[in-house]
Amino acid sequence: MLTQKDYATASLSEVKALLRKHEAFESDLAAHQDRVEQIAAIAQELNSGTCEVESMAGGLRTEKQLESIDELYLEYAKRAAPFNNWMEGAMEDLQDMFIVHNIEEIQGLITAHEQFKSTLPDANKEREAIQAIQAEVQKIAQHNGINLSGTNPYTSITPESIDSKWEKVQKLVPQRDQALQEELGKQKSNDHLRRQFASQANMVGPWIQTKMEEIGRISIEMNGTLEDQLTHLREYEQSIIEYKPNIDQLEGDHQLIQEALIFDNKYTTYTMEVVEPLQPADLVQQPLLVALLRPLQRVPRPIDILDTAAQR
């Protein structure tokens, strides 16, 4: 290509030579014009092909990301379902009403509850892992400009429902702790009442049985003078009356047992039915006094007869 520098100081002959040279270049250029146009067309096709390749590559990347999201959705569903079932079972157990009858039974429930509490850290790790899967789905979609449908095609369990149930489990655990500890205190109180009743019953029961046997023998044998028999029986009557506070205490202990709805007592074989009777307290002595009254009623009558004969 000619420039001003090529012909600025040239002579006429030199300019003519340059002109012929330029004409030759144009002629040569014309001869290659078709080839240039072909090269330009090829370049344009290559440029168009590059866009198509890039578009295809972008489509392949999107398809691959969608496959990754689908796999994550499936993994989420596989782990969320059993974890959701575990939380629902845990909530049911934590709210379950319990009935126990002694310290051993409530301590068994407390031990089971403590074992359950020890599993909570691992359960929380599983919850976090499940939520991390969902977070990865969101990350992939956001990074690649993918609009998610909004729902997991493999499960209806949402991350929000998992967190909601987990929070409920967390609230129920201390409530269960409190209920179990309150019941433990109640059972300890009941055990104290059992021991208290048993201590008194194990003393009163044998005493009543012994007295009944002694009075039975006295009413049959009736040895000695009438005055001696009467004195002896009066002494028994007085001993029974003096023992009444012990029986009253037993009745009071039994009343507390009834109010606490305690129906068993491993510390004694005696019940108020054995010590008899249950109500009222004064009647506990009645079988003894009635048994004692029969010989007492018989003794004074012969004495009166002797007194009457002596007066005559």
Image (spheres, rainbow, N blue to C red):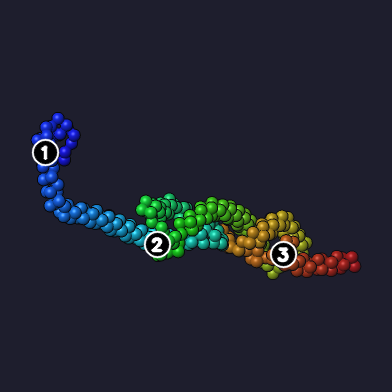
Measure the alpha-carbon separation of dots 3 and 2. 66 Å
Q: Nearer the viewer, residue 137 or 47?
A: 47
Image quadrant of residue 6? Answer: top left
Q: Amino acid at mark 1?
A: Lys
Is residue 267 visible in the rendered image? The answer is: yes
The amino acid pointed to by label 3 is Gln
Residue tagged 2: 77
Q: Which residue is mark 3?
A: 279
Say which of 85 and 143 sits in front.
143
Tell me the quadrant of the picture where the N terminus can be found.
top left
Of helix, strand and loop, which one carries label 2?
helix
Residue at the extreme top of the image, as rendered: 9
| 290 shown above or below 68 | below
How far apart are the alpha carbons under marks 2 and 1?
Answer: 87 Å
**Which one is in front in this view, the residue at disc 2 or the one at disc 1?**
1
Across and down, in percent, residue 279 comes to 72, 64
Identify which residue is drawn at 43% across, 52% down.
Answer: 124
